[in-house]
Every structure is written in C-alpha cells, then in structure tokens.
Image: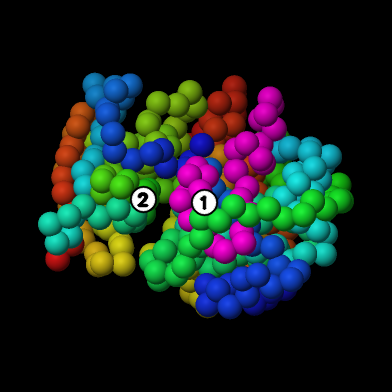
Amino acid sequence: MSRTDVLVTADWAQEHLGDAGLVFVEVDEDTSAYDGGHLEGAVKLDWKTDLQDPLRRDFVNKPAFEALLSAKGISNDDTVVLYGGNNNWFAAYAYWYFKLYGHGDVKLIDGGRKKWELDGRPLSKDIVQRPATTYQASEPDLSIRAFRDEVVAAIGNKNLIDVRSPDEFSGKILAPAHLPQEMAQKGGHVPTAMNIPWSKAANEDGTFKSDADLAKLYDEQGFDESKATIAYCRIGERSSHTWFVLRELLGKSDVKNYDGSWVEYGSLVGVPIEK
Amino acid sequence: MCGAPKQGGALAGIDLSTQTVIQGSVWHDGAPVAGAYVRLLDATDEFTAEVVTSPEGEFRFFAAPGEWTLRSLSPVGRAERRIAADVGLNETTLAID
C-alpha cells in the first residue's frame, strides 16, 4: 500500500470523471453541498441517514450496507473514489467504513471538495442515476475498529491519539467550534492520550501533508512504533482522517479507529478522565 | 454531528448567556463572499473549526471566552483578524483586500 494506491489528485479525478469502473462518491453530513453542485457523475452518501443505523448508535449492518451500495449502483469490483466537505472528514470516515465492509479498491481525492472549489473546478447539478447492482459486503473487519473496553484497556499501553483540537483535548470546549457547546458528556481526554490534532496532518487547502512531513509529525509527538494504536475524536470522523494517515499513507500496522469516541467515552460512568 | 449547520440567520434558540458566539461576514470589493472557507484558530494558532460562508457571506462559531484568530480562504483571496471573545455575541467582519 502506498500513497498513490489510496489517494488521487484533483487533476487525476478531473481527467477520469466518467471512466468505466470508477464511481465517484461525495460524502457529507449536509448533502445540500452535493445538491448545489457535485463532481460530474458522482453519487452522494449522507453520513447520517445512509451510514448510521436509524435507531441505535452504530453502523448500518451488512445487509443494509449491501442494499445501500446496490441502490447507488456500486459494484464490488468498482474503484470507489471518495471526496467531501469538512477537509474530507466524512469521506475519510466512508473510506474506513468501506474498508471495514471489505471493499477492495477505495481512494480519496486529496483536498476533497474544498480544494476542488478553491481551484474553481467544474461542478454539475445533474441528477445522477446509476443502474442498480447486487453488492456483496464482507463481514465487518473489526481489526480496524476499536470499542470502549479496548480503549480503557489501552490506557498506558497503546498509542492513544486524540485528534481533536487542543481546546477540546483540554476540556475548554466540548465540540468543534462550529457547533453549540451544550453536550451531556464531561470535558477532557482519555488518560495517557497524545493530542495530535487531525489538522496537523493537512494543509490549509485540505490536502494531506507529504509522507515525510507526516512521519516527522507523529515521530515528534511521541508515537511509539512498537505499540498498537487507537485514534479517537468526538464522533469518529476526524479520527478516520488520522486513521487514514497512519494506516494507509504511513503504512503503520494495527491502527484502529474508535468511532464511539468522546461522545461515548465522556459519558461512561466510572472511567478515568484527564483534563 | 460534526458538519457545520447552515451559516448565518437568526440567533433564535441560541442561549447567549452561556454560549460564546463569534460571527460575522466575509467581504471583498464591496460585496459579501459566499462559499469562503473561514477557520477559527485558538490562542496558539491551532485549528479549532472551519465553516463555509452562506450565500450572504456569513459565518458563525461557538467558542469559549478568550483570544481567537479568524482566517478566510477563498478564490478571491484571504483575510485574517484576531478577536477577543466574551460570553455572548461577538461580531466581526473579515475584509479581503
């Protein structure tokens, strides 16, 4: 696995729009961005309504994921090229999610929607309808997903990486600052977690920093190569961005994303918290 | 939910006795700039949040009292401004030269 296997440039994407065997997928929480203009031929996935169970806090299950991808016209042997807003947070989340359900070839567009817009590249408002497929997902690959008990057990043992902003890490604020600050959970972080914000891995235009810069970043922050790693944020999307950097770009082994993240951990009774 | 809510609009439903709201608009050449990326940086210049301006060029953050920097990025250029925020409403304008 190397950078070119998992990341494509906006130039490459623009040249390959419409190619057979490629499916461009925009992933956002607020799909009004897609509706206002998207990459030619791209289908949309709504982070919340498509990728979250409508009742419990969890993923959609395997049959529901299969039904979703079949309806979107995505086949098992298609190359899925993901992009989205928020510096690709939700696209990275979808990347991790597609990998969890065993999709073979998935890529991110470097810089996502932001770089595309800043470059003034063309957007389309055409309604995209792809013929339905019969998608078959694998059983969830839990080697890349961490649950709460593993996080508690990882205190002092594994690389715990809190990728939220320093003010969320310290408990000064409880959510990223574009959201109202009224949350049920306690402020702070998991003891022994390193605070390596996702944003340190990205340039201002949303593209990822170079492999050399990324390697230096985690090295300087105390990442221990001999240990397994769990990344978390508030709800698991920013930590997907860091999971992508650590596992897919830097090729580190045994990296999990804790999608329960602070919304779960900060609400658990009796677990240790540091501030 | 981490996607930014729709920017601008009424403050109805926002408790200004507890929230520290930093809001304003991005302007260039006498007109508001829609679709500009505005990021909020903390007192150490670290990224805290980012939103995209509304059709009226508006942005809004929910922060905490203290020193912040706002930086806008758009195809027409960039602008930056420091702001000291208190609990309640803190309004500012980012002008791109």
Give the quarter of the figure containing the N terminus of chain A.
bottom right
Do the residues at discs 2 and 1 belong to one chain? no
Horizontal side of A105 relative to A162 (left or right) equals right
Residue A221: percent from the left, percent from the top?
Answer: 49, 62
Give the residue type that dot 1 points to.
Tyr
* Residue at mark 2: chain: B
Q: Main secondary structure of the magenta part?
A: loop
Q: Which residue is mark 1?
A: A34
Distance Cα–Cα, label 2 vs label 1: 14 Å
- For label 2, count other residues whose C-alpha is less than 10 Å away and answer few (under 14), some (14-19) or many (20+): many
Q: How far from the left and from the top, in percent, is residue A92?
A: 60, 56
Residue A21 forms part of the magenta stretch: no
User: A41 or B58: which is nearer to us?
Assistant: A41
Residue span colored magenta: A30-57
Disc 2 to disc 1: CB gap under 8 Å: no
Taking depth in this image into account, of A240 and B53 the one nearest to the observer is B53
Q: Name the secondary structure under disc 2.
A: strand
- Judging by the rendered image, the residue that carries numbered circle 2 is B52
Identified at 17% across, 55% down, the residue is B31
Tell me: residue A109, above or below residue A231: below
Seen in the picture, residue A121 relative to A68 is either above or below; the reply is below
Query: Residue A148 — which label?
Result: none
Nearest to viewer (mark 2 / mark 1): 1
The reply to whether residue B78 is in sight is yes
For the point 76% across and 46% down, the residue is A71
